[in-house]
Image: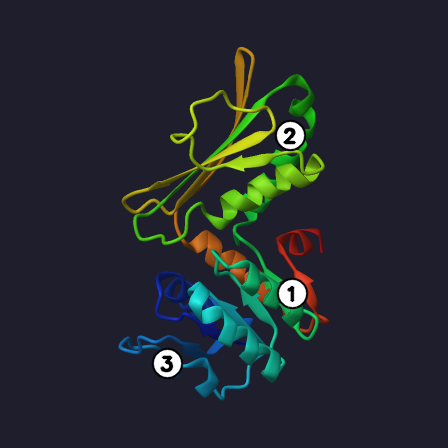
Amino acid sequence: MIKIIMHGCNGKMGQVISSLVEEDKECSMVAGIDPYVNKSNPYPVFSKIEDCDAPADVIIDFSTASAVKPLLEYASKKQIPLILCTTGLSDELLDLVKKTAVKIPVFFSANMSLGVNLLINLVKRASEVLYDVDFDIEIIEKHHNQKIDAPSGTALALADAINESLDSRYDYKYDRHIERKKRDKNEIGIHAVRGGTIVGEHSILFAGKDEVVELKHTAMSKEVFAVGALKAAKFLAGKAPGLYNMENLINE
């Protein structure tokens, strides 16, 4: 039985994951961490992670960037593997993630959906094929009106995957209203839409002469991310220290 601490347990994703764990015979939720402890949880909830004394095999995190530093410090001190799902991390925090992964296993992914990570592999291949025939690349991401960071971590992960497959030839363009000029060949336009209750939608347009290729992923519910997080928890338990991602999980 894999014992889980849910960091951000009273957020929407925390609640979805908690529900899935209740139905999973391989896992159990031993504690939750959340500054808002006004919900009725079937496990003890601590407002601060440093107060948590529950023995666990893994921590799953869906919280905010401001909570990540103490989380990394706690996981490292307690030697508990960490599934880090919070996006919008600063360069300083990303550096701390890498340093922490030297001490404990850390699973870090901009998106926990298996479908999105398949999409990342597809856009790499499409970019390699279409670059030499002058296809322009634009990424459009859509999310609910409560999402704080923009563009999404997934949109940036898609852009980075394209760039890495083509030896970092691209610059990212987030806003075109300031400059009045034609787009450059070696740029990726990244656009964020916020509205309503959109769970998550990512489209990559490859626009060439007289034809357009579009690759797209739409999340219909938050459960797709929760399922991925649980798969990652089962994957990470017992692993050696290191930085892991969805590609490691998919290829295992």
Q: Secondary structure at mark 1?
A: helix
Q: Secondary structure at mark 2?
A: helix
Q: Which mark is residue 127?
A: 2
Mark 3 or mark 1, which has the lower sequence index?
3
Q: What separation in Å lies between label 2 and label 1 (alpha carbons)?
A: 28 Å
Circle 3 Cα neighbour tier, 10 Å, few/some/many (<14 / 14–19 / ≥20): some
Q: In the image, 201: left or right of 159? A: left
The correct choice, above or below, for 231 with respect to 1 in the image is above
Q: Out of 228 and 83, give the one closest to the viewer.
A: 83
Where, quadrant-wise, is the N terminus in this rendering? bottom right
Which residue is disc 3 drawn over?
47
Residue 121 visible in the current orientation: no
CA gap between label 3 and label 2 equals 45 Å
Say few, some or many: other residues with alpha carbon within 10 Å of mark 2 (under 14 / 14 to 19 / 20 or more). Answer: some
Q: Tell me which corner region of the image, top left, top right, bottom left or bottom right, holds residue 124.
A: top right
Query: Of callouts 3 and 2, which one flags the residue occurring earlier in the amino acid sequence?
Result: 3
The image's colouring method is rainbow
Q: Amino acid at mark 1?
A: Lys
Q: Earlier in the sequence, mark 2 or mark 1?
A: 1
Disc 3 marks a residue whose amino acid type is: Ser
Q: Position of residue 100 (x, y in %)?
A: 64, 71
Check disc 1 and report the residue beneath it: 98
The residue lying furthest to the top in this view is 210
User: Which one is in front in this view, the residue at disc 3 or the one at disc 1?
Assistant: 1
Evaluate if marks 2 and 1 touch, with contact meaning CB atoms under 8 Å apart: no
Q: Is residue 9 above or below residue 184?
A: below
Q: Nearer the viewer, mark 2 or mark 1?
A: 1
Q: What is the secondary structure assignment of the residue under circle 3?
A: loop
